Image: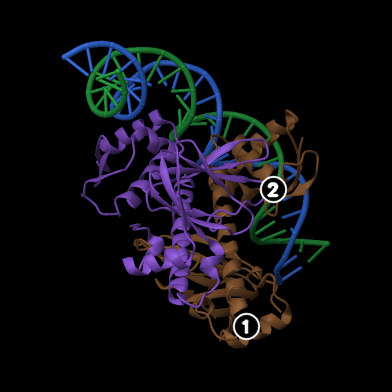
Chain colours: A brown, B purple, C blue, D green
DNA sequence: ATGATTTTGTTGCATTTGCCACATCATATT
DNA sequence: AATATGATGTGGCAAATGCAACAAAATCAT
């Protein structure tokens, strides 16, 4: 049964009731298959039950940019990305995956049976949107740093919870980190070396310490 | 009466009913005064009725960063920024202002009288969060560009709706634009000059054209 | 109107960063 | 085990950018 945050505060019985009441559907998708295009109406709240997916934004000129990567228990749908200003949003299966579709209207409009669950799920959805916004604000905060060193430190302080001396793993390769920080990989390596020499950080592979 | 998007699709009569049913309160604040600190519960949905305000995030070390600037009819509250990971969020009056407080619980929990308005306002709130997320994604998209020219173009294409040859104003000074793009002001000026010489853009003061 | 303050526009110079090329190491794949 | 593929680590060099300093123009306050 799904442990997604959208069901926070609900036990298995609650979920069962919801599935019946909310007319929830589930579908499997093959890797590469399109899951949905975002509408300009609030239609679906979707949950990844297994596998992984991606959301892309495509602009008028056909430029395609990755918006987010979705794993098991992640939630997506128009609630998170409204297709404003001519952008088209598409969710696509990355690996084979199973997606749960919950009709947005069923969530928002109260029914006679399960009223408590409605407001519970709405709460959870707002918490999820706020969480997603924080992820974006973090990235902005990092990208808005003036140089490579500050970018890396801003990221490491977040990833290491600002705790000094404790070893932690960044959940990606250095190459991916460079892309996330929007700096050249070799420039990042160079700066890391300097910071090691100065005793500011310790690192080995994708393990880091703040000193 | 407030024209805020949170009341989209409602006439004056609807709003009046809501104000009575939702136990809405209104308070005036002097410039610089603190309006509220964000709680870790979904407590308030707030609307700026007049004047302006700012939201700051303060981290454990006391570093203070501006999260957003709020003008008349803007909406703020825990729904938009949840104080995760040790950050404290504070809303503060910029100019003298008047703020409307709507209890979050009153919005989410259905009542006997005005059920249609509940789901209407919830809809609008989700639309507003999605809109705010797009603002953040735009900034990320701009900051993630490789150089000054691409950053400026990414911004201008957004601000000018990708329409070529049409004059439009960026709603800020060049100095502020440089801060928004996170580049040195003189570097921005230099690049603007080059782009003018190459016939890519036209500009005068804070007016631009894409060519 | 006057003076003060902010914004714009420009330039030389130092520094940072990106780009390229290469060697080494780790990880899959056959 | 052999091979391919991708990630890491390093360095030279050129280009882009930031910094500092200044003059001119525009805006604001009195």
**Residue in the picture at 57% in, 84% down:** A22
Q: CA distance from mark 2 to mark 1?
A: 36 Å
Callout 2: SS: helix
Would residue B173 appear left or right of A7 to someone viewing this image? left
> Mark 1 highlights which residue?
A18
Q: Is residue B97 visible?
A: yes
Which residue has dot 2 on it? Answer: A159
Percent x, y for residue B161? 30, 54
Q: Looking at the image, which residue is at 43% across and 63% down? A: B19
Q: Residues within 10 Å of mark 2 (few under 14, many from 20)?
A: some
Q: Is residue A165 above or below residue B80?
A: above
Give x and y (percent) for residue A201.
74, 36
Question: As rendered, which of B18 and B95 lies closer to the eye?
Answer: B18
Of C27 and B194, which appears nearest the observer?
A: B194
Marks 2 and 1 in Cβ contact (< 8 Å): no
Image quarter where the C terminus of chain A lies is top right
Instruction: Give the mark nearest the N terminus, 2 or 1.
Output: 1
Q: Dividing the picture into quarters, in which one does residue B207 lie?
A: top left
Q: Tell me the element at label 1.
A: helix
Could you classify mark 1 by the number of other residues whose Cα lies within 10 Å: few (under 14), some (14-19), or many (20 or more)? many
Q: Which label is found at residue A75? A: none
Which subunit holds the residue at mark 2?
A
Residue A144, percent across and down? 52, 40
């Amino acid at each position: 049964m799904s442990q997604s945050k959208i069901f926070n505060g609900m036990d298995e019985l609650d979920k069962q009731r919801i599935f019946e009441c909310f007319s929830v559907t589930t579908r499997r998708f093959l890797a590469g298959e399109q899951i949905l295009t975002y509408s300009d109406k609030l239609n679906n709240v979707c949950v990844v039950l297994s596998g992984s997916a991606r959301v892309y934004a495509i602009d008028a000129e056909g430029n395609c940019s990755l918006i987010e990567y979705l794993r098991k228990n992640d939630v997506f749908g128009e609630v998170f990305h409204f297709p404003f200003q001519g952008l088209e949003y598409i969710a696509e299966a990355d690996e084979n995956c199973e997606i749960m579709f919950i009709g947005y209207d069923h969530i928002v409009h109260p029914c006679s049976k399960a009223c408590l669950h409605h407001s519970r799920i709405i709460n959870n959805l707002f918490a999820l949107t706020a969480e997603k916004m924080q992820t974006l604000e973090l990235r902005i905060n990092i990208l808005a740093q003036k140089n490579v060193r500050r970018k890396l430190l801003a990221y490491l302080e977040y990833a290491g919870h600002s705790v000094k001396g404790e070893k932690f793993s960044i959940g990606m390769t250095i190459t991916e980190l460079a892309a996330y920080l929007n700096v050249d990989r070799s420039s990042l390596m160079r700066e890391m070396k300097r910071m090691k020499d100065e005793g500011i950080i310790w690192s080995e592979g994708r393990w880091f310490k703040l000193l």
